[in-house]
Image (spheres, rainbow, N blue to C red):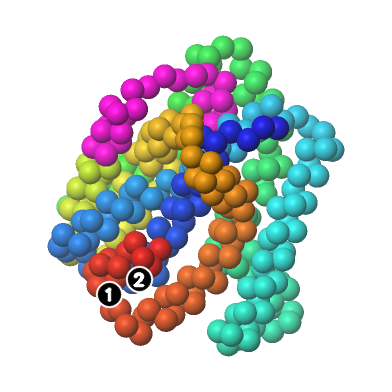
């Protein structure tokens, strides 16, 4: 299958956003009371870069919409699992003999198979399940007989997954509203998968300049709401920001539409984007060790999220 630069660019941005988001995970941002311009900027960056995982999921739907239930398809999981096992083994060795973590042989084996050997492996655990479900999800999607019915499928998932994070965490007299059923919020990967399928099947023409302005406007609005909701307290993931939140989903769609059909003429850029895209899974898993080394060193010299923010670009 011929590689499409725009799709590689989506994956390139998605993997680039991982260390951007983990920057705030590792600089004590989430354990510090929010107050001041630096925190507003930090939240704005989190809002933008948080779409990395959704981009991966949408790309999966875009590329795998036609996969069917056959032995050949399921063999594709072997490459993913071998990469995970190999990198998890390296992570275990480095954690034990370099970071001096308290790891024993039996617990290290258990950690590999419960996806805890590599600190960011939760995505692999989720993706393996999604991979096995894809042929059945495609039966559902591809047998809906009209564009409108496919929109109903996505709309229904949005209804059961994406409304509660906004409504339930509104406080009235210090009490959370919590009136919207939220049992199904955990199936948010299906929303992104089916949106990817939809974008693969139906061409959506957009004015990219207007879409970019719209995306920045939404990001600023969400940042303003989150900042004021969390003012003088620790950042709350529950309210207005999560993978299943409607604004996260909307921003993910916007960014996908901005880049998925781009054609860059530079051969050097094409090569870099393609190679990073091909190695995105390995980059993601290895980033755990890189983060531990990087922030383990920097924590001796930088103190607090605002001081870290001054060096945001060179660090990530």
Question: Which residue appears at 67% of the width and 79% of the height?
Answer: 93
What secondary structure prevails in the magenta region? Answer: helix
Q: In which quarter of the image is the N terminus?
A: top right
Question: Along the horizontal axis of the image, is 309 left or right of 299?
Answer: left
| Label 1 sits on residue | 304
The secondary element bearing badge 2 is classed as loop
Q: Nearer the viewer, residue 3 or 145?
A: 3
Asked if residue 144 lies in the magenta stretch, the reply is: no
Few, some or many C-alpha atoms within 10 Å of disc 2 (few <14, some 14-19, many ≥20)?
many
Few, some or many C-alpha atoms within 10 Å of disc 1 (few <14, some 14-19, many ≥20)?
few
- Verify CB contact (< 8 Å) between mark 2 and mark 1: yes
Write the start and end of the magenta stretch as one range: 190-218
Q: Which of 309 and 148 is in front in this view?
A: 309
Where residue 204 sits, quadrant-wise, is top left
**Residue sticking out furthest to the top:** 146
Asked if residue 198 lies in the magenta stretch, the reply is: yes
**Residue sticking out furthest to the left:** 36
Q: Give the number of marks.
A: 2
Question: Which residue appears at 57% of the width and 59% of the height?
Answer: 283
| Label 2 sits on residue | 27
Q: Is residue 147 above or below residue 82?
A: above
Rendered image: mark on residue 144: none
Question: Which residue appears at 48% of the width and 31% of the height?
Answer: 263
Q: How far apart are marks 2 and 1 (CA)?
A: 6 Å
Q: Which badge, 2 or 1, is on the more N-terminal residue?
A: 2
The secondary element bearing badge 1 is classed as loop
Q: Which of 176 and 91 is in front in this view?
A: 91
Q: Where is residue 286 in the image (x, y as percent from the top left)?
A: 58, 65
Q: Is residue 163 above or below residue 17?
A: above
């Amino acid at each position: 299958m011929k590689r499409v630069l725009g799709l590689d660019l989506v994956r390139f941005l998605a993997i680039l956003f991982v260390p951007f988001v983990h920057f705030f995970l590792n600089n004590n941002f989430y354990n510090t009371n929010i107050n001041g311009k630096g925190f507003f900027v930090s939240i704005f960056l989190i809002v933008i870069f948080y779409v990395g995982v959704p981009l991966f999921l949408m790309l999966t739907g875009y590329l795998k919409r036609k996969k069917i239930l056959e032995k050949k398809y399921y063999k594709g999981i072997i490459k993913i699992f071998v990469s995970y096992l190999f990198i998890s083994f390296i992570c275990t060795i480095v954690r034990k003999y370099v970071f001096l973590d308290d790891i024993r042989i039996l617990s290290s084996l258990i950690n590999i198979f419960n996806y805890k050997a590599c600190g960011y492996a939760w995505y692999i655990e989720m993706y393996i399940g999604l991979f096995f479900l894809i042929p059945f999800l495609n039966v559902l999607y591809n047998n809906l007989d009209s564009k409108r019915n496919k929109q109903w499928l996505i709309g229904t998932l949005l209804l059961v997954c994406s409304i509660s994070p906004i409504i339930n965490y509104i406080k009235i007299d210090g009490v959370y509203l919590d009136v919207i059923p939220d049992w199904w919020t955990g199936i948010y990967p299906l929303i992104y998968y089916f949106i990817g399928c939809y974008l693969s099947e139906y061409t959506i023409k957009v004015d990219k300049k207007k879409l970019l302005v719209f995306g920045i406007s939404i990001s600023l609005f969400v940042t303003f709401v989150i900042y004021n909701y969390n003012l003088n307290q620790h950042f709350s993931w529950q309210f207005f920001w999560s993978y299943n939140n409607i604004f996260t989903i909307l921003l993910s769609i916007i960014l996908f539409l901005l880049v998925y059909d781009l054609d860059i003429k530079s051969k050097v850029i094409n090569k870099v984007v393609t190679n990073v895209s091909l190695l995105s899974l390995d980059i993601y898993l290895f980033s755990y060790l890189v983060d531990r080394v990087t922030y383990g060193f920097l924590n001796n010299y930088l103190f607090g999220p605002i001081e870290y923010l001054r060096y945001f670009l060179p660090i990530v």
